[in-house]
Image (tube, rainbow, N blue to C red):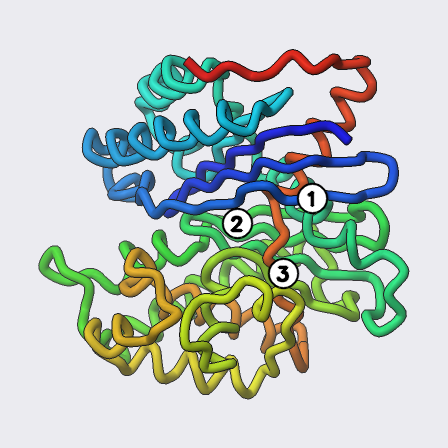
């Protein structure tokens, strides 16, 4: 087993996984997994730049994560940055800040690389299950982008498109500097049209309708699962590998888009950082399910972080890594 740390910094959240990984058997023993809403992508779609306050929120989370990584004595650390930092003109400020805090340079990966990691993380433990037919369609609905990956044991086709819960909210549901509470029918219609256009784009590369099992990843999907199960609090164990029907997803999505901020905030499993963007994220999921005719979505708590961890452990094994612990600065 190799002890590794993986950090995934997206548009809406930054997440850490510290785990002992056996790359040959696919065993992953989780030691610490945490998520912080930092909204790094605040305003990026409009300005093309990372906001100073968004950078500071992200760096504060990095300082917290550095202490956790050091405490567990991880042998290797990999920091992956996704949609928001790909798009930003001032991403060098972000890179320098992370390097100073954690001692590693963030890898600003492509959408296709993001999709590969997500697929590995979500499906590695599904191998051999005869109740889930292959090929899988893994859908990772992030803050700024959504990744689509079709494959069986390995990726067959992948595509990243620029629709996510934050991007769709900022593009369509903000009026007068505030998120509409609730949005108008015209706003929802425009957002749905944008999502459908992105699905058209994804289908040019990925045979979405060939998949037999839809696997949904990331906070929008897991939150919909928590709402569907009426959980008294967010419970990863009950969310992981839960199955939510299309009708239930539609019911939840319609309610979220009709509800007020206060009503959504009162949901006991709702993270405060998702209150204003969950309606858009749920609509992305519903549109995908309707497009491919999926009767249900299998929800996974294992995603790009787990994929990164597996890759780091494989590289460590190939290099014959000893137990030289990472020492975040």
Residue 53 in the image, given as x and y percentages of width and height: 19, 34
For mark 1, does the 10 Å Cα neighbourhood hold few (<14), some (14 to 19), or many (20 or more) residues?
few
Above or below, 61 relative to 155: above
Sequence-first disc among 2 and 3: 2
Residue 282 in the image, given as x and y percentages of width and height: 45, 70
Q: Which of 98 and 76 lies nearest the eye of the viewer?
A: 76
Q: Which of 311 and 317 lies nearest the eye of the viewer?
A: 317
Residue 178 falls in which quadrant of the image?
bottom left
Above or below, 63 relative to 243: above
Sequence-first disc among 3 and 1: 1
- Judged from the image, the secondary structure of the residue bearing numbered disc 3 is loop
Residue 128 falls in which quadrant of the image?
bottom right
Residue pictured at 75% horizontal, 54% vertical: 123
| Nearer mark to the viewer, of 3 and 1 | 1
Instruction: Tell me the residue that label 2 is attached to.
Output: 161
State which quarter of the image contains the N terminus. top right
User: Would you say 272 lies left or right of 318 here?
Assistant: left
For mark 3, does the 10 Å Cα neighbourhood hold few (<14), some (14 to 19), or many (20 or more) residues?
many
Above or below, 329 relative to 180: above
Residue 175 in the image, given as x and y percentages of width and height: 15, 62
Residue pictured at 75% horizontal, 48% vertical: 157
| Nearer mark to the viewer, of 2 and 3 | 3
For mark 2, does the 10 Å Cα neighbourhood hold few (<14), some (14 to 19), or many (20 or more) residues?
many
Instruction: Tell me the residue that label 1 is attached to.
Output: 29
Instruction: Tell me the residue that label 3 is attached to.
Output: 300
- Judged from the image, the secondary structure of the residue bearing numbered disc 2 is strand
Between the residue at mark 3 and the residue at mark 1, the CA separation in whole angstroms equals: 16 Å
Query: Do the CB atoms of the residues marked 3 and 1 lie less than 8 Å apart?
Result: no
């Amino acid at each position: 087993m190799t002890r590794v740390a993986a950090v995934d910094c997206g548009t809406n959240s930054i997440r850490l996984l510290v785990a002992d990984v056996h790359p040959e058997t696919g065993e992953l023993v989780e030691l610490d997994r945490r998520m912080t809403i930092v909204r790094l992508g605040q305003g990026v779609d409009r300005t093309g730049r990372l906001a100073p306050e968004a950078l500071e929120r992200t760096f504060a989370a990095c300082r917290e994560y550095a202490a956790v990584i050091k405490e567990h004595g991880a042998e290797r650390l990999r920091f992956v940055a996704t949609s928001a930092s790909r798009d930003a003109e001032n991403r060098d400020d972000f890179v320098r800040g992370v390097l100073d805090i954690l001692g590693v340079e963030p890898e600003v990966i492509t959408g296709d690389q993001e999709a590969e990691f997500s697929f590995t993380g979500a499906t590695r433990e599904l191998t051999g299950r005869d109740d889930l037919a292959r090929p899988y369609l893994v859908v990772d609905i992030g803050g700024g982008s959504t990744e689509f990956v079709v494959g069986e044991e390995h990726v067959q086709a992948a595509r990243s498109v620029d629709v996510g819960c934050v991007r769709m909210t900022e593009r369509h549901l903000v009026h007068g500097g505030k998120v509409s509470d609730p949005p108008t029918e015209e706003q929802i219609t425009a957002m749905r049209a944008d999502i459908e256009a992105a699905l058209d784009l994804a289908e040019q590369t990925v045979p979405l309708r060939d998949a037999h099992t839809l696997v949904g990843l990331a906070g929008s999907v897991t939150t919909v699962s928590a709402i569907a199960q009426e959980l008294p609090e967010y419970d990863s164990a009950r969310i992981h590998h839960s199955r939510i029907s299309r009708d239930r997803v539609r019911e939840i999505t319609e309610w979220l888009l009709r509800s007020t901020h206060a009503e959504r905030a009162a949901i006991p499993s709702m993270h405060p950082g998702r209150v204003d963007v969950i309606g858009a994220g749920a609509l992305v999921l519903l549109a995908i399910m309707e497009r491919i005719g999926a009767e249900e979505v299998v929800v996974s708590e294992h995603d790009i972080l787990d994929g990164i961890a597996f890759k780091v452990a494989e590289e460590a094994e190939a290099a014959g890594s000893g137990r030289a612990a990472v020492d975040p600065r």
